[in-house]
Image (cartoon, helix red, strand yellow):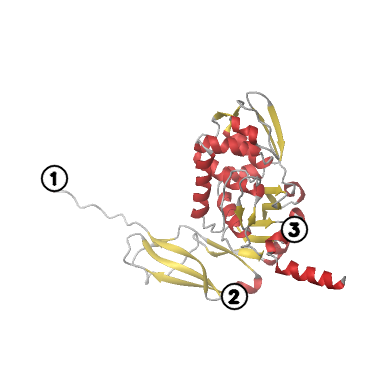
Amino acid sequence: MIKKIFIFIILLNLLPFKVFGLSYVVMEEKSGRILESSNMNSKDLIASTTKIMTCIIALENNKDLNRVVKVPDDVLKMYGTNIYIEVGEEIKIIDLLYGLMLRSGNDAALTLAIETSNTVDNFVKQMNAKAKELNMNNTIFTNPHGLDEDTKNYSTAYDMALLARYAYKNKIYREIIKTKKYRCKTSLKSYLWYNRVSILNNYKYSLGGKNGYTPKARKSLISYAKKDNMTLISVSIHDNDIYERHKKLFESNFNKYKLYKIIDKDNFSYNKKIFSNDIYLKESFYYPLKESELDRVSTIVKVNNNNNKIGGNISIKLDNKEIGSVNIYKKKINKKKDKTFLEKIYNKFKN
């Protein structure tokens, strides 16, 4: 009996980690710095966290979010979590987006895909093009909802953090995911939806997010939290304890790191002997650091007096490794225009 148990343990260790294990990552939103991770490049099914990509593609490709659309026949194929819209029902794009993110409506995902790109296949192409643009190199989308019986979406904790960071830059997306309750009315009925991402109600620093589950993918969660001036993104895949894990990850990293303004665009001093023009910065530079890292940060200024617009660059380093850079811009100098020949004659006779 002991021998059999020993052989079983060896076999478990030889099997790919993703079959049994958890992968997660914590990323700081402004800088994209990875604060903590485990198996973050392990590829796995991502279930309904897929809908973050669906949401951002729909947001970027529908100029009028109040446009009313008709629910297509295809929704009859949807199973799992739905908002239970009916074929022919007329509903606004914005309402579909709330149904997508708050209630994880697979029927909402399908309707958005068809209305945005005419066909699901075209929409999926846009999803994969966006993934490529964001350097989500271990990601493949085959549907807009995350169901994995017929077609499957694969990604990693790291790739989904890249997506979550990108999506968070969209103001409407931020508003949707932090909404706890939403009401809307269609041509057929009224809806009242509560956000299924329970961490929004159970963790005071939470800014919402998106959860996912299928029997094959198990549970997954992408969530955001903000404390003081620092926003963190937490992603966990194949995780049976998503909400407690995210709370612990947030608290641990809020305690370890603070967000520092290393370069301040409004208080930038420079040696005028070095630059031939007056200069300015368009942006400040923030970075999350442990207290022990503060004295290991350095900056190097590179001057460029040849370019018409950019006067140089500030390289920011941590332990001699570049963690970011900020361009230096030249101020425009308004030179008085030379008077034309006619203006000179006019002024001569005027005097």
Q: Secondary structure at mark 3?
A: helix
**Disc 3 or 2, which lies upstream in sequence?**
3
Task: Provide the residue designation for mark 3.
Answer: 245
What distance separates the C-alpha of mark 3 from that of mark 1?
78 Å
The quarter of the displayed image where residue 28 is located: bottom right
Q: Earlier in the sequence, mark 3 or mark 1?
A: 3
> As shown in the figure, which amino acid type bears the numbered disc 1?
Leu
> To which residue does mark 2 refer?
295
Residue 326 visible in rendering: yes
Q: Identify residue type, mark 3.
A: Arg
Residue found farthest to the top:
188
Residue 59 visible in the current orientation: no
Mark 3 vs mark 2, CA separation in Å: 32 Å
In the image, 58: left or right of 344?
Answer: right
Q: Rate crowding at label 2 as few (under 14), some (14 to 19) or many (20 or more) other CA atoms within 10 Å.
A: few
Residue 90: x %, y % from top left: 60, 26
Spatial distance from mark 1 to mark 2, Cα to Cα? Answer: 64 Å
Question: x, y percentage for residue 252?
Answer: 72, 63
- Tag 2: amino acid: Asp
Front residue of 269 and 82: 82
User: For this view, does 149 lie left or right of residue 310?
Assistant: right
Q: Nearer the viewer, residue 72 or 302?
A: 72
Q: Quadrant of the N terminus?
A: bottom right
Picture coordinates of residue 166, whole percent (x, y): 55, 52
Q: Is residue 242 left or right of residue 135?
A: right
Is 134 placed above or below 16 here? above
Which secondary structure, mark 2?
A: helix
